[in-house]
Image (tube, grey):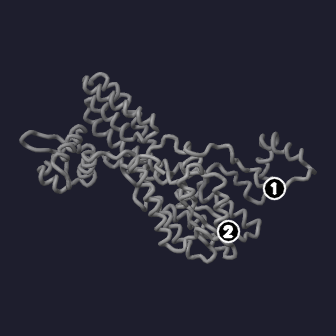
Amino acid sequence: MMRKDLPHQVADSLYKMIADTQEFRPGDKLPGENTLSDRLGISRSTLREAIKVLCSQGVLEVYRGKGTFVSESMESFISFGLDELDLNRSRVKDLFEARLLFEPQLAAMACQRATDEELGAIMEAGKLVEEQIRLHADRTSADQEFHQRIAVASHNRFMLQLLPIIHSAVSETIMLNEHQELLSDITLRDHALLMDLAFRTHNMRRIVYGLDVYSFIARLDQTGSDVPLYLYDDSLLNDVSYWLNRSVLATFLPRCLSAWGQKQDDSIRDSMYCWAGQDEYGSVALYTARFTAPENPLPADAYIRQAQANLDAHLLPYVAAHPETQFDIFFPPYSAAEWATMESKGTLESMLALRSLCYDALSGFANVTIYDFTTRADWVLDLNNYKDALHYGQWINDAITECIARGENVVADRETLDAATAQLRAWADAQIEAGGWIF
């Protein structure tokens, strides 16, 4: 998300004093400029700009010679509970429906009531949104400004107060949901299903396990996609759904029968399910990505509870139950751009915290060795290794295997892990400051 300027940040703080903590009630007079600016640690000119923002939203009213007052109309919002909307992160569907109900009529009112100056402001804001879309940049702030200018042009004070609250709740919920969607590739439950099958059917001497931090924030029962669970049990009868589907009958079964009795080169197993070579690697991985500082970053502990629950349900029990099995567990080498992407979305610290959580939970087991490849500069700073900011080529998989075999990149202690985490943060910060890829 784009960082708000200081007056808008101060306006947000003042709004919370009114709607959240209710330090200032509807009808209350705000302290004088000197007192309030000193308390907030800002200049009087910045405070005046913040007050203008809240006046435009109908939150404050300025009376010449008397001072600045909280609008009496705020009483209906606080008593009705609308200030709590931006705390409700689980009802994004309802919030979008609210926008669909209000905004078409709001636009119609703006068309009828807008002044020439207000129409110009709407057009200017719309062009900024278009520019952000063209650059593939985050357009959250620009989009909110566009809708805010429409609300101003409607000359409806109720909507001026309601719309910013809905937009704030929607944008922050989207930020959470975007990361929930990223885990769709694979979850810890996917890994658990595989280990169930492996331990049930084989004498497992060694497991190599990638600790994808995105997989830790899934629901406990969530899989990356619709998994045919009947294939994971010991019953052959319920496998009929697999054998009788079109692709098996029309493609794979004839292919297998045509090779019946023929001598096969065993090496084919190394490539028969390899999709390498179908993707483009290099600078295309980032397209035209731009990195911007987050507006409302998540706290570092945002995902800790869910991640701990996933560890307790889907990984630690297997490690504890199979002391005879060596677990080589590694942090995979995302490109440095992925960590900058997290910071842009406000989730960097909450995702970095999962590294420490995993290390602390696993390092005490005698049958676990932890490896960290996240700061292999020769890999993660070279986009030629990536088809996007997250997924690397099969040659990196080969290199990881060789490093584990040689005992390289082992995390010997917590200090080693923390130093790597600090490096990831530094790379992300450098890209945020530059606004894009710099390596």
Which residue is at the front of the view, 261 or 82? 261
How crowded is the residue under tag 2: few (<14 C-alpha within 10 Å), some, or many (20+)? few
Is residue 138 depicted above or below 426 in this figure?
A: above
Q: Nearer the viewer, residue 302 or 141?
A: 141
Going by the numbered disc 1, the residue's amino acid type is Ser
Say which residue label 1 marks.
267
Q: Is residue 423 above or below residue 288?
A: below
Residue highlighted by disc 2: 405
Q: Are marks 2 and 1 in contact (CB under 8 Å)?
A: no
3D distance between C-alphas at marks 2 and 1: 21 Å
Q: Position of residue 93 (x, y in %)?
A: 46, 42
Classify mark 2: helix, strand or loop. helix
Tag 2: residue type? Ala
Q: Relative to 194, is 70 on the left or the right?
A: left
Residue 288 image offset from top left, x and y in percent: 49, 40
**Count of marks placed on residues:** 2
Q: Residue drawn at (77%, 52%), measured in percent from left and top?
A: 238
Q: Residue at x 25, y 23 (%)?
A: 116
| First along the sequence among labels 2 and 1 | 1
Q: Is residue 410 above or below residue 130?
A: below
Q: In the image, is residue 54 above or below residue 406? A: above
Question: Residue 383, percent across and down?
Answer: 56, 49
